[in-house]
Image (spheres, helix red, strand yellow):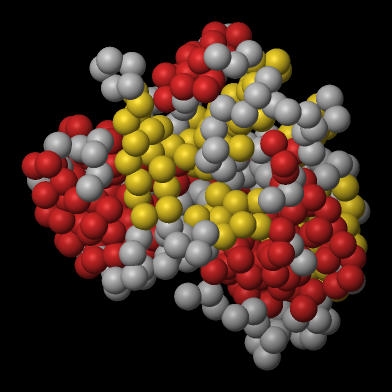
Amino acid sequence: MSGARVVVVGGGLAGIGAALDLADAGCDVVLLERRRRLGGLTWSYERDGRSIDNGQHVFLRCCSAYTGFLDRIGSAGDVELQPRLDLTVLAAGPGGEVRRARLRRDGLPAPAHLARALLAYGHLRLLDRARIGLAALPLRSVDLDDPALDDETFGSWLRRHGQSTAAVAALWDLITVPTVNLPADACSAAMGAKVFQTGLLRDAAAADVGWARIPLGELHGERAAAALAKAGVEVRLGARIGRVEETTAGVTAGDVDADVAVVAVPSTEARAVLPAAAADALVPVEGLSTSAVVDVHLTFDRRVSELGLFATLDPMAQWVFDRTASSGAGGPGQYLAVSLSAADEHLGTPNDDLVAAVTAALRRVLPAARLATVTDAFVTKERTATFRAGPGSRRLRPGPATASPRTFLAGAYTDTGWPATMEGAVRSGRRAARAALVATGTTRSLPQEVA
């Protein structure tokens, strides 16, 4: 079958990526999105003349599917990518002083590229620095598909390999919390190992950090809308979909008849959208649960930091982004967005209390903020930002195929091997598109597998 008609349900990164791959392969594609915008969990809104991202998202150089996606939709020129990993980590000392450490790679091949920075990492005792290799070297070659690895926490694995509680908190969780959206003591060892093996231990350039220079709503949503239109994809926003139904000739979603369907909605919604024949098989996915992300947005009346991006060891100021320029904010002040991952405990906290706690945390590590006035402050919360990648989660993640031979799954929660990141979402869309094309007999124009 050539020129198959495909309906894609969901307009996040997974659905957009799938729709573009399908259209590029010659399919007639209709994309249905219940919201009035594209981009899924990466979106922006206007506040007092500024464009505010609902959450802060970074990517790494190793995120090849995502960077390819940016290139496909015409956004590759609107992101910043470090030429070399360089992250400043701040912490407040016992006497109120600010302690700085810098994680910067040098020109050596992996894993030696970070040795110098880790040996000088002043947030750890010298003994803990000397023992980092006891975990890093085994992580480089550990079998990510070993079921036993997925059955324990990353924290327990690290302690078995010589890492102290202080080292886990001050180094390993610095990366684990924002990437997996869980601390090492709660996330699967397989997922933690994936992050470090792929991002830091096998390729020296893999962990160079990238971020958007423009609002996410423009970077993803607006640019994707234009790319989809150019590719001939019919996009219906505000669509009422209900359940995808099987027919004698194919599938139907809403009022769209198609040969096959790709369901690219969150894990919490997928079972209600899949055909009845496939929905029950998705019951295990409900065991994944979700993990929240909270962002606290603060505008100061003056510049309080020279850093565009930095991390702290204070749990109330994990990663901090200068969004002054990208938001379009004018005037002499500075707008900082503070991202708190693994933030379920903060969902019930009053916004005023969160603002006060985060402001205090920033003032502990930014001396200039102690003299500055907060002129605007607000909170955004994504209650179901990611699936919960705890021990045993790998076996709960489905592949693209379902019990319905004409319906396929996409979404960061599916079994891509990656955590719930933008990279994982795009990879899932590509996998679902390939599966849908094979089901329609289209095998000559399959999207390329991503390494």
Report which quarter residue 71 is drawn in.
bottom right
Tell me: residue 17, above or below residue 100: below
Image location (x, y in percent) of residue 94: 26, 17
- Side of 170 where 57 appears, left or right: right
Q: Is residue 220 visible?
A: yes
Report which quarter residue 107 is drawn in.
bottom left
Image location (x, y in percent) of residue 121: 25, 44
- Side of 19 where 85 appears, left or right: left
Q: Is residue 4 visible?
A: no
Image location (x, y in percent) of residue 285: 49, 45
Residue at x-position 55% and y-position 49% = 58
Tell me: residue 102, above or below residue 231: above
Q: Nearer the viewer, residue 269 or 450?
A: 450
**How many marks overall?**
0
Residue at x-position 24% and y-position 66% = 112
Residue at x-position 54% and y-position 11% = 356
Q: Nearer the viewer, residue 124 or 47?
A: 124
Q: Give the residue furthest to the bottom.
A: 444
Q: Nearer the viewer, residue 337 or 287?
A: 337
Q: Nearer the viewer, residue 102 or 212?
A: 102
Image location (x, y in percent) of residue 412: 55, 52
Residue at x-position 66% and y-position 30% = 335
Tell me: residue 298, above or below residue 127: above
Quadrant showing the N terminus: bottom right
Tell me: residue 450, above or below residue 129: below
